[in-house]
Amino acid sequence: MRCCPLCGETKVSLYHQDHRRDYYQCATCSLVFVPSDQHLSAADEKAEYDKHQNSPEDTGYRAFLGRLFTPLRAKLPQGAKGLDFGAGPGPTLSVMFEEVGHPMAIFDIFYAPDTSVLQHVYDFITATEVLEHLALPGQVLAQLVGQLTPGGYLGLMTKRVTTQAAFSRWHYINDPTHVCFFSEATFEWWAAKHQFTVEFPAKDTVILRKH
């Protein structure tokens, strides 16, 4: 039985198919997802990430991350402590926040797997280009919610689903490590369920605030 990896709903329907994979949509939270039996192995997934060449010296990458950094920084009190979850092979957003006075921890299952940082609470948590890779986004987001202080922020970057027609032509689904696709409706559903406020500063940026 197909089951939504965000909310657990079993009422799902086929949303799109291509020559490699199937994409289902949840009737409750609207998440579009690839079934787990069509995911890459962990080794193949890491091999894809090893191709990434991001670093703090890359001004283009900094500008890309600025779509989250700039609006989130404006909300943070001085000295707020953060966690960059899924920092990747070249942590950069954490460096940007540290440069303006925010102490940062990083975690990445492949590149910075120190789970002790997941035992602490933070004033803000960022996850840029992470959600689309998660096999179990519901579990991961629940973990992050538990690590946020009241009034804390969860800052996310992931490209969003708009229409079925656009999805069928979308370059984003061609990456074999992308298995979950959120829409504004999905984020709004999740925010309401977990008592967060939500705003969308850019077409691929989401800032959620814990009540």
Image (cartoon, rainbow, N blue to C red):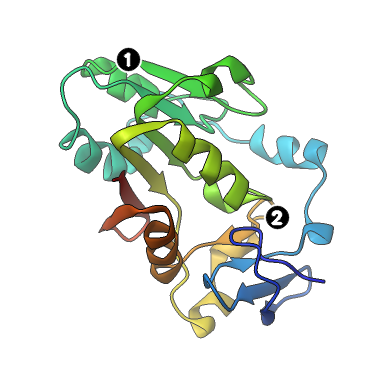
Q: What element does badge 1 sit on?
A: loop
Q: In this view, does 122 lie to the left or right of 89?
A: left
Residue 55 figure quarter = top left
Residue 111 figure quarter = top right
Q: Name the residue under label 2.
A: 176
Spot occupied by residue 21 in the image (x, y as percentages of width and height): 76, 69
Q: In this view, does 28 lie to the left or right of 57?
A: right
Considering only vertical position in the picture, is 89 above or below 193? above
Considering only vertical position in the picture, is 102 above or below 135? above
Q: Which one is closest to the eye, mark 2 or mark 1?
A: 1
Q: In this view, does 127 lie to the left or right of 136?
A: left
Q: Which is nearer the N-term, disc 2 or disc 1?
A: 1
Residue in the picture at 30% in, 24% down? 96
Q: How packed is label 1: few (under 14 Cα within 10 Å), some, or many (20 or more)?
A: some
Q: Can residue 57 be seen in this view?
A: no
**Residue 103: which numbered mark, if any?**
1
Residue in the picture at 67% in, 78% down? 11
Dot 1 amino acid type: Pro
Quarter of the C terminus within the rendering: top left
Dot 2 amino acid type: Pro
Quarter of the N terminus within the rendering: bottom right
Frontmost residue, 72 versus 122: 122
Q: Can residue 115 be seen in this view?
A: yes
Whether pointer 2 and pointer 1 mark residues with C-beta atoms closer than 8 Å, the reply is no
Spot occupied by residue 18 in the image (x, y as percentages of width and height): 73, 76
